[in-house]
Image (cartoon, rainbow, N blue to C red):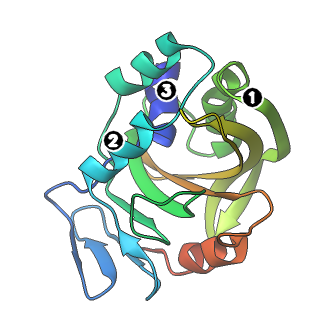
Amino acid sequence: MVKQVFCFFLLTLLMVTSGFAEEGKYSNPTLGFSVIKPADWTFITADENLDNIARSEFKDEATKEMLMKYATAPLVAMTKYKEPYDDVNPSFKLNIKPLNNFDASNPKAILEVVVAPMSKMFQDFEILQGPENTTINGRNAGYVRINYSMKVPDGRTFPICSELWIIPRKNFFFMVGAGTRQDEKTGTREEIKGILNGLIIEN
């Protein structure tokens, strides 16, 4: 259970058949939400996402194999630059997960389960904010912000800032993940905030 929830955050492919992207906007009438892509960003494909995973290194090969095993397609994913990109590519990704036994009134508790395994998987892992309950566009949500280092096969290490939001519904929850450089040299968290502010959830 913990592995599956965690991997919804880390491994993001793209698109399910109930949604569509056109003119810079992704809409999913089945789940009742839409999100607008900034004009200078691009939607990414499943193959591009898998290539990104393949270029990343984790603390051990078993961790990487586990992440690949539980890879699951998100509803929508976008990046600031077209892949492949030779630095930290700012990203915004949204997925869903069944609520199961989680309490929809306490998204913070869901995040605590998601975050727990991460300290063992990344270098220099540090929680900067949260997990905490908050609101997104008037809806109850959970939020956490994390810094860690990601190594790539050529030996370079990049400073990553990951943000994660949980937005519960009746029997499932939206999981929104975003990544930037810690120093924001390739893209800012303010850009991420702009995309999040354009996330419309109906009913």
**Res. 97 image quadrant:** top left
63 to the left or right of 24:
right
46 to the left or right of 35:
left
Whether residue 58 is situated above or below residue 174 in the rendered picture: above
Mark identifier at residue 50: 2
Q: Earlier in the sequence, mark 1 or mark 3?
A: 3
Whether residue 198 is situated above or below residue 87 in the rendered picture: below
According to the picture, the residue beneath numbered tag 1 turns out to be 123
Residue 88 appears in view: yes
According to the picture, the residue beneath numbered tag 3 turns out to be 101
* Front-lying residue, 86 or 80: 86
Q: Residues within 10 Å of mark 2 (few under 14, many from 20)?
A: some
Q: Measure the alpha-carbon separation of dots 1 and 2.
A: 21 Å
Which kind of residue does numbered mark 3 sit on? Asn
Seen from this angle, which residue lies furthest left? 17
Mark identifier at residue 13: none
Q: Quadrant of the C terminus?
A: bottom left
Callout in the foreground (1, 3): 1
Tell me residue 108's x, y (percent).
70, 42
Q: Residue at x 39, y 47 (%)?
A: 96
Q: Residue at x 48, y 10 (%)?
A: 62
Which kind of residue does numbered mark 2 sit on? Leu
Give yes or no for contact between labels 1 and 2 (Cβ–Cβ under 8 Å).
Answer: no
Q: Residue at x 75, y 39 (%)?
A: 148
Give yes or no for contact between labels 1 and 3 (Cβ–Cβ under 8 Å).
Answer: no
Q: Earlier in the sequence, mark 3 or mark 2?
A: 2
Q: Residue at x 82, y 40 (%)?
A: 127
Q: Residues within 10 Å of mark 1 (few under 14, many from 20)?
A: some
Residue 106 appears in view: no
Tell me residue 31's x, y (percent).
29, 61
Label 2 sits on a secondary structure element that is helix
